[in-house]
Every structure is written in structure tokens, then in C-alpha cells.
């Protein structure tokens, strides 16, 4: 078995197992199980981000950032569940303001960081980039109204999102490995090609049609035109999300966020594309479809 094929199956296996675990908690109705898994993944990814920076000699407020992220995720989950996703923005801003006040207070009394402005910038970016963007998965779940029998439909939109996003990732890898000749963004990731990019769009669009055909009644908020638009837009956003993490890793002079997942790297490598596609789907559903 060639190295490329082995890597493909390792990536596919790790992705399927982890996302199946996450989605099973959603479909089983274990809301706190979903919250725990969501929180673990987001906090682990944020910790990997902090570790990449620290290993490159870049100071960050790791413990304070993780505590802030936990408050952002778990407090936001409670507000979204109780009052709806449109009511959590003030809370998220409050958490960020309190974080900045905490960091300034820490510097005034402890002087723990030689370059506090730089450390604050990298830490705040990490909070926005990982736990805040990842929390849009929760917002999507509670955005859609329940059916007359009380059954939630939000989990099906999350399933659609994850499937389309991961098909984009796998399409980019397969088409890029088989046909890749033309560099796409060599200054960011030399292995990314235009062939892989178009393969990502083709795969995400195909998956979008397939998911809609598979459960049209569960995705009733979508029309055929929405499925086409989202298939392309989410596929593009997934590529951008993958490149965004490549920029972070390149800046930290590392290849993977960690070596925890076979064929993938770390948790951040697993969720990087979701960080961009989840907000896109949420805002499309709110402002284009008028849900919520």
C-alpha cells in the first residue's frame, strides 16, 4: 500500500470515528454529552494552538485563555439552549471584555509576560478563531424550530454541515493527490493545487445533493437552489478554513497541531474547516432563509 493511500485511509478512519461519536451524542438527545464533546474538542484544539505558539517562543496566556474559552462555550450553550442563539452575543462580548480586564490586571500586579500586547493579541485571536467559531455548531442546533411533536431538527443541519465539509476535505485530498499539478497557494501550503480545489467543490456539491435527496423532510428549510449554493459556498469555505490553519501552522513553524490523530494530526487539524463552514451555514440560515 502506497504512503498516499495509507494516509488517505488513516485520515478517513480518524475522521469517521470522531465525527460519528460527536453526531451520535446529538441524535441520541444527550445534550450535555454533546456539550461535553464539543467543549473537549474546542478546548483541546485551543490548547494545541497555544502549544504551537509557545514551542515557537511566542508567549500566550494559556491558562487564562482556556478558562475564558470554557466560560464562553459552556455559558453560551446554556444561553443558546434557554433563550435562543440570537441572545448569546452580549454574553460572548462580556466574556471577551472580562478576559481583557483580567489580562490587564494580571500585568499590573504580576508582570507575568514581557510582551503583554503581543500575548493578548495571539490569545484573543485564538479565542475567536477556535472556541467562538466552533460554538456555531451549537447555534445551528438550536436555530431551527422544533416540529409539532417536539422533535428537534437542528441536528440534521449539523449532520449536513459536517458531511459537506468533510466531503470537501476528502475531495481536495483525493483529487489533489491523483491529479494535482498546478499550485494553488504555494506561499501557504505547497501541496495545495487547483485540481484539489476544484475537486473539493465538486465533492461538496455532490454531497450536498446527496444529503438533500437522502432526507428532504429533515432539511425542509432548504430549496434546491439553497442546496446548490451551499454545496459550493461551504466547499469553498472548507478550503479557506484548511488554508487558514496552514497559515497558523506556518507562522508557528510546525507541520501539525499535534500527533494525536493518525493521518490527521491534532484536533485543530480535524476541525479547521468546520470553523469556517459552521458560521457560514448559520448566517445563511438566519439572513437568507430568515430562520430564527
Image: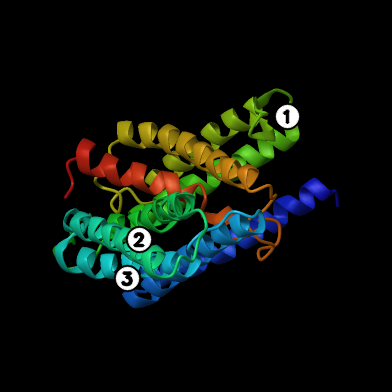
The residue labelled by disc 2 is: 104
Q: Give the spatial CA distance, label 2 vs label 1.
A: 52 Å
Q: Is residue 255 left or right of residue 231?
A: right
Residue at x 18% of width, y 61% of height: 146
Q: Nearer the viewer, residue 130 or 226?
A: 130
Residue 32 pos. (x, y %): 34, 77
Give the residue at mark 1. Answer: 179
Measuring from the top left, give residue 31's x and y in whole percent.
32, 74
Disc marking residue 74: 3
Where is residue 132? Give x, y as percent.
Answer: 36, 55
Q: Determine the secondary structure under disc 1.
A: helix
CA neighbours of label 3 inside 10 A, class few (<14), some (14 to 19), many (20+): some
- Regarding residue 201, the answer to whether it shows in the image is yes
Given residues 242 and 155, the one toward you in this image is 242
For mark 2, give the secondary structure.
Answer: helix
Asked whether, in this view, residue 8 is left or right of residue 163, the answer is right
Q: Quadrant of residue 82?
A: bottom left
Mark 1 Cα shell of 10 Å, populated few (<14), some (14-19), many (≥20): few
State the SS at label 3.
helix
Amino acid at each position: 500500500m502506497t504512503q498516499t493511500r495509507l494516509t488517505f485511509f488513516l485520515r478517513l478512519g480518524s475522521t469517521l470515528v470522531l465525527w460519528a461519536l460527536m453526531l451520535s451524542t446529538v441524535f441520541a438527545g444527550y445534550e450535555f454529552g454533546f456539550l461535553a464533546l464539543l467543549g473537549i474538542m474546542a478546548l483541546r484544539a485551543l490548547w494545541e494552538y497555544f502549544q504551537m505558539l509557545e514551542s515557537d517562543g511566542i508567549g500566550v496566556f494559556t491558562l487564562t485563555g482556556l478558562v475564558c474559552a470554557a466560560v464562553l462555550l459552556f455559558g453560551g450553550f446554556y444561553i443558546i439552549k434557554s433563550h435562543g442563539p440570537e441572545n448569546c452575543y452580549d454574553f460572548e462580548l462580556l466574556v471577551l471584555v472580562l478576559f481583557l480586564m483580567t489580562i490587564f490586571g494580571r500585568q499590573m500586579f504580576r508582570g507575568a509576560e514581557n510582551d503583554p500586547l503581543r500575548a493578548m493579541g495571539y490569545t484573543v485571536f485564538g479565542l475567536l478563531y477556535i472556541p467562538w467559531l466552533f460554538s456555531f455548531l451549537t447555534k445551528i442546533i438550536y436555530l431551527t424550530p422544533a416540529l409539532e411533536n417536539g422533535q428537534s431538527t437542528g441536528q440534521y443541519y449539523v449532520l449536513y454541515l459536517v458531511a459537506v465539509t468533510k466531503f470537501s476535505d476528502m475531495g481536495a485530498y483525493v483529487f489533489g493527490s491523483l491529479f494535482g499539478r498546478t499550485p494553488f497557494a504555494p506561499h501557504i501550503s505547497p501541496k495545495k493545487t487547483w485540481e484539489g480545489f476544484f475537486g473539493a467543490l465538486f465533492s461538496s456539491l455532490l454531497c450536498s445533493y446527496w444529503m438533500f435527496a437522502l432526507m428532504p423532510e429533515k432539511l425542509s428549510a432548504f430549496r434546491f437552489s439553497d442546496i446548490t449554493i451551499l454545496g459550493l459556498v461551504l466547499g469553498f469555505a472548507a478550503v479557506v478554513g484548511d488554508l487558514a490553519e496552514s497559515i497558523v501552522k506556518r507562522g508557528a513553524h510546525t507541520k501539525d497541531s499535534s500527533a494525536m490523530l493518525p493521518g490527521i494530526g491534532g484536533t485543530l487539524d480535524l476541525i479547521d474547516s468546520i470553523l469556517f463552514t459552521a458560521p457560514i451555514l448559520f448566517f445563511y440560515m438566519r439572513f437568507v432563509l430568515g430562520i430564527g
